Image (cartoon, rainbow, N blue to C red):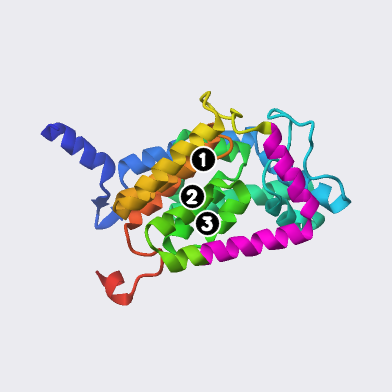
Amino acid sequence: MTARALAAWKLLSAPSTIGGRRYPAIGLLILAVIGATFVLVIAGRSWSGGQDEHAYWLAAQRLLTGLPLYDPTATSVTPYTYWYPPPLAQVLVPIAAILPARAFDIAWVGLQLVCLLWIARWRPLVALALIVFLPVAVELSYSNVHLILAALVVLGLRRWPWAFAIGTAIKIAPGLGILYLLLRRRWRDAAIAVGVGLVILAASVAIGQGTWSSFIATVQSRGPADISGLLPVPYFVRVAVALVVTLVAGLIRPRIGEPLLVVAITIALPTLWLDAFATLIAIVPIVALGSPALTSPTPAAAEA
């Protein structure tokens, strides 16, 4: 890299000091402005009505009214079809009983934004800059669960291993995080994640055993060769690749292995449309924080 290119990179990426005051990097400000523009467009076009989150509200309403959770006639393009395991809908039942659909939509968007801010370590400019990553913008537009999954993966690795169990109850793929913990010989963390997962499963089955039977039938009807993604790759192939990537991630140093785990979880998601790749932003805090746990620093560390 030439001296001129280095100077330009430093100008864009390094914070500047003017009049004794420190200002964010110009590059960060540019990305944040672009991200803010995306948010304005998304708010005007998508947040005025229900998106994917409406499927979750409808699923909880079906449980409330005693209707079947899964529609055996639904296809991958049927609007507001619920495809997830039962626990998410079951947990949302008391919320859906109180909140009307529009209030639920707004609350879900708020939850997404909180997860994005948390991943950005509560820095609004960084959060806006992350929206320039197109899958994040699409995720905010469709209001799915991938930003929530990204936050759960970071928590599972850094603070609360049981977060992997919650992610698994939502979209199965985060269960690879438990395999990663076992490969890293983090036995206590893996045991906690498995234990919480079994409790969630037992409670869910106790609440609605027939619901689980319907879920298994729904999965079987789609089959392992189901293609739900940008690339024409059967799901069983993606799962096999994700398992191999997880095994590699667990056998190499965590600095590289943890980002690889995020990649594996993303590959293994049941549907791999563009918004699913928003899960990859979990790599940002993982790399930024390095190996230490995601906890408040000790006084000595804070001073350093």
Tell me if residue 5 is in the magenta stretch.
no
The answer to whether marks 1 and 2 mark residues whose Cβ atoms lie closer than 8 Å is yes
Say what secondary structure mark 1 lies in: loop
Which residues are the magenta region?
Answer: 192-221
Q: Could you say where residue 13 lies in the image, as x and y percent from the top left? A: 27, 43
Q: Residue at x 12, y 32 (%)?
A: 2
Position of 160 compared to 62: left or right?
left
The residue lying furthest to the left in this view is: 3
Q: Which quarter of the image is occupied by the C terminus?
A: bottom left
The kind of residue tagged 1 is: Ala
Q: Which mark is residue 268?
A: 1
Q: Earlier in the sequence, mark 1 or mark 3?
A: 3
Residue 200 location, x and y as percent? 65, 61
Q: Quadrant of residue 271?
A: top right
Residue of label 2? 176
Q: Left or right of 10: which side holds 85?
A: right
First in sequence: mark 1 vs mark 2: 2
Q: CA distance from mark 1 to mark 3?
A: 14 Å
Name the mark on residue 164: 3
Q: Amino acid at mark 3?
A: Phe
